[in-house]
Image (tube, helix red, strand yellow):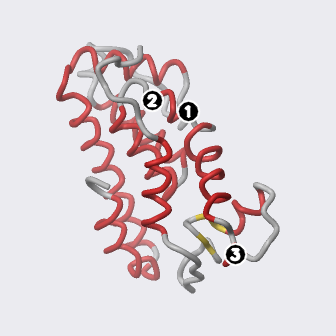
Amino acid sequence: MPNRECPPVDADALIDAVIDREGRYVNHPADRGGPTCWGITEAVARAQGYSGAMRDLPRTEAAAIYRRIYWLRPGFDRVALRAPKIAAELFDTGVNMGTAVAAGFLQRALNALNRAARDYPDIAVDREIGPRTLSALDAFLRTRGAGGETVLLRAMEALQGERYIALAERRPSQEAFLYGWLANRIGPH
């Protein structure tokens, strides 16, 4: 059920913003992703056919990877037709934590906000955006109205923040990134 009142999401703008936040080449010793350029890890770049030096990854290639892997493949474009703010959050969280984690946050939040399944049935937290997740999102937005998207977004960000802190607690080396994650990944981007 696309929301015709919402302005369409500009996926190119989301991609450009995340590339700007991620920056050029880095190879931080505490970053388990290894060499990264524009936020694209070497493993992802290689899986997508890039064979050059990571520090030379073209920005346009990074943008194409973001669109394919972090926007279209997980179905965040379909969420954007219903809830643009939620889609933008899914994309940003998916880039940083993985698209399955982002989808799982949405599903958990939808289940927690359905008033004990009175508004719509619980959905499986399978970490994929499929027909049941979209149906639950439609029902949530219909039931909660204009402010619903903001509340759902807050619930997803709460889950994201908890995960960052738990990660830093489990692996002290990740404390090097915690401040930046909380400053740049939670709240308006």
The amino acid at mark 2 is Val
Q: How far apart are the alpha carbons under marks 1 and 2? A: 7 Å
Q: How far apart are the alpha carbons under marks 3 and 2? A: 33 Å
Q: Left or right of 115: which side holds 124?
A: right
Q: Which residue is mark 2?
A: 79
Mark 1 and mark 3 residues within 8 Å of each other at the beta carbon: no
Q: Above or below — where is 37 with respect to 152?
A: below
Q: Left or right of 186: which side holds 20?
A: right
Question: Which residue is found at the position 27% from the left and 35% from the top?
Answer: 152
Q: Which residue is mark 1?
A: 75
Q: Which residue is mark 3?
A: 56
Q: Earlier in the sequence, mark 3 or mark 2?
A: 3
Q: Are there few (<14), some (14-19), or many (20+) residues within 10 Å of tag 3?
A: few
Q: Above or below — where is 9 with respect to 78?
A: below
Q: Nearer the viewer, residue 113 or 84?
A: 84
Q: Earlier in the sequence, mark 1 or mark 3?
A: 3
Question: Which residue is found at the position 44% from the left and 77% from the top?
Answer: 174
Viewer-nearest of labels 1 and 3? 3
Farthest residue to the bottom: give it.
Answer: 29
Asked which secondary structure carries label 1, the reply is: loop
Screen quadrant of the C terminus: bottom left
Q: Left or right of 63: which side holds 152?
A: left
Q: Are there few (<14), some (14-19), or many (20+) residues within 10 Å of tag 2?
A: many
Screen quadrant of the N terminus: top left
